Image (spheres, rainbow, N blue to C red):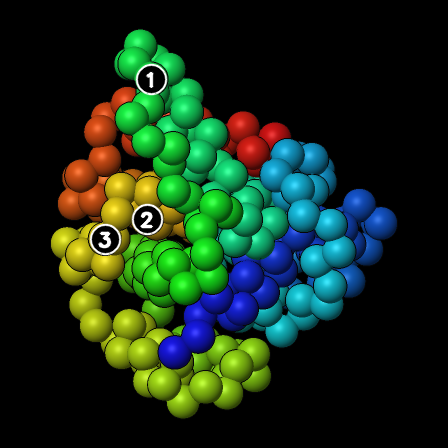
Amino acid sequence: MNTRGLLDQLLKSGQDMLQNKAGGSQNKTSSGGLGGLLGGSGGSGGLGSLLSGAGGGALAAGAMGLLLGSKKARNVGGKVALYGGLAALGVIAYKAYGNWQSQQGSAPKTEPQTLDRLPPAQVELHSQAILKALVAAAKADGHVDERERALIEGEFTKLDNDQELQQWLHAELSKPLDPTEVARAASTPEMAAEMYIASVMLVDEESFMEKSYLDELARQLKLEPGLKAELEKQVRQASI
């Protein structure tokens, strides 16, 4: 199963939408996609502009929009600016680690191995874990019913016709939401940080249900409180 390319398309789709907005065409985006999020966006700054040339992402935007579901009408806003592809997640995690270690007053024993600094085979492992976290976060508000699962699976099929990936997605969408099970996908601390960043991007922290899920996921990922706070801070700053 190859998730790296698919996940990169999903994450870049928000950047495409931001570029459309900057050109004054936000009203032309699909009402079923990310267009409804852009009203609260703070512009195309931050890590959203980290990667240039995101390319056409209409299909990916449709898939991400369905994952967001009812959130499209909420003030998720500037978080869309963060979707710059996989490299952006790695940059955020790396910076958060650096700041957190500085706060500890101790030099890092080893450099954080975030996905922007790894060989392709390891990037693929990180990608699978992050995609699992995204799908789970999409279910945190309980909006993914049988009909919406079918729609999401249909959009993913348009993006990638990999049968193994389709079966995996169907299983992930169908299983009960369990932050403990989600956290088991993190085999390294850096992977845990990246999964948490992806989850923060998708949830509405003003929703008690979604915020509770996020807090429990952080506990299950065994994130230190200081690192958790720094990861959230980096997401907020990237969203400006």
Disc 2 to disc 3: CB gap under 8 Å:
yes
| Residue ID for mark 3 | 187
Q: Which residue is the extreme one toward the top? A: 105
> How many angstroms separate mark 1 from mark 3 (CA)?
23 Å
Q: Quadrant of the C terminus?
A: top right
Q: Is residue 14 left or right of residue 199?
A: right
User: What amino acid type is highlighted by mark number 3?
Assistant: Ser
**Percent coordinates x, y for residue 92 in the rendering:** 48, 37
Which label belongs to residue 126?
none
**Percent coordinates x, y for residue 136 in the rendering:** 31, 60
Disc 1 to disc 3: CB gap under 8 Å:
no
Q: Earlier in the sequence, mark 2 or mark 1?
A: 1
Q: Which residue is located at x 54 percent, y 28 percent?
A: 237
Q: Quadrant of the N terminus?
A: bottom left
| Residue ID for mark 1 | 107
Q: Secondary structure at mark 1?
A: loop
Q: Earlier in the sequence, mark 1 or mark 3?
A: 1
> Would residue 24 be seen by someone viewing this image from the given angle?
yes
Q: Secondary structure at mark 3?
A: loop
Residue nearest the viewer, comparing 61 with 4: 4
Q: Which residue is the extreme one toward the right? A: 23
| Residue ID for mark 2 | 191
User: What amino acid type is highlighted by mark number 2?
Assistant: Met
Q: Which residue is located at x 26 percent, y 47 percent?
A: 188
Q: Which residue is located at x 35 percent, y 62 percent?
A: 125
Q: Which residue is located at x 52 percent, y 81 percent?
A: 160
Compared to residue 26, the image places residue 50 above or below, namely: above
> How many angstroms separate mark 2 from mark 1 (CA)?
21 Å
**Percent coordinates x, y for residue 80 in the rendering:** 58, 47
**Percent coordinates x, y for residue 192 in the rendering:** 29, 46
